[in-house]
Amino acid sequence: MPVASDAQRADNDILPRSVALQHQGAEAQAKGDLTAAVDFYESALAADPRNRSAIVALAQVARAQGLPGKAIGFYREALLLEPNDVVALTGQGEALADKGALELAREKLADAKRVCKANCPQVAALEKAIAAGSEKRVVAAEAIAPKPVVATVGTSQN
């Protein structure tokens, strides 16, 4: 149960129990057990809802499961806690690119570049995801474009 002293904790002062559960989630994720990882991350958030790292980890698991929409929601939650979190900004941008929302992904890229002045590997990964999304979009458009039908002129007999 929350106590009065909880309100006085710093935003980055995450309860140790939450951090321990998050580490267990990371271990499960590294082993490929995404179901157990989600359980640990959710337990970490139950122990301390301000554990932004656990929220980002849930988003990463959602992307690994092929659920970019769910990942976008988790990244949004993390950004509510810290709007300048480069990992959450770029992760959300990558998930947006996965869904084909390239303009929104580019907006996240601009935000990430504003926050990260130096060379950030996360920014480079988002740029790569946007480029890959652009290529997929062109290929997909070619796949559904109707092929021209050439009419043959036949001879009619009267």
Image: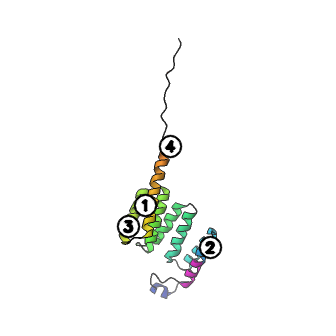
| SS under mark 2 | helix
Query: Label 2: which residue?
Result: 28
Report which quarter residue 18 is drawn in. bottom right
x then y, percent, for residue 141: 47, 46
Determine the CA span between mark 1 and mark 3. 10 Å
> Which segment is the magenta one?
14-23
Residue at horizontal 35 percent and vertical 69 percent from the top: 114
Count of labels shown? Answer: 4
Query: Label 3: which residue?
Result: 111
x then y, percent, for residue 50: 49, 78
| SS under mark 3 | helix
Looking at marks 2 and 1 on the same chain, the residue that comes earlier in the sequence is marked by: 2
Q: Quadrant of the N terminus?
A: bottom right
| Foreground residue among 8 and 140 | 140
Q: Which amino acid does label 2 sit on?
A: Ala
| Foreground residue among 39 and 60 | 60
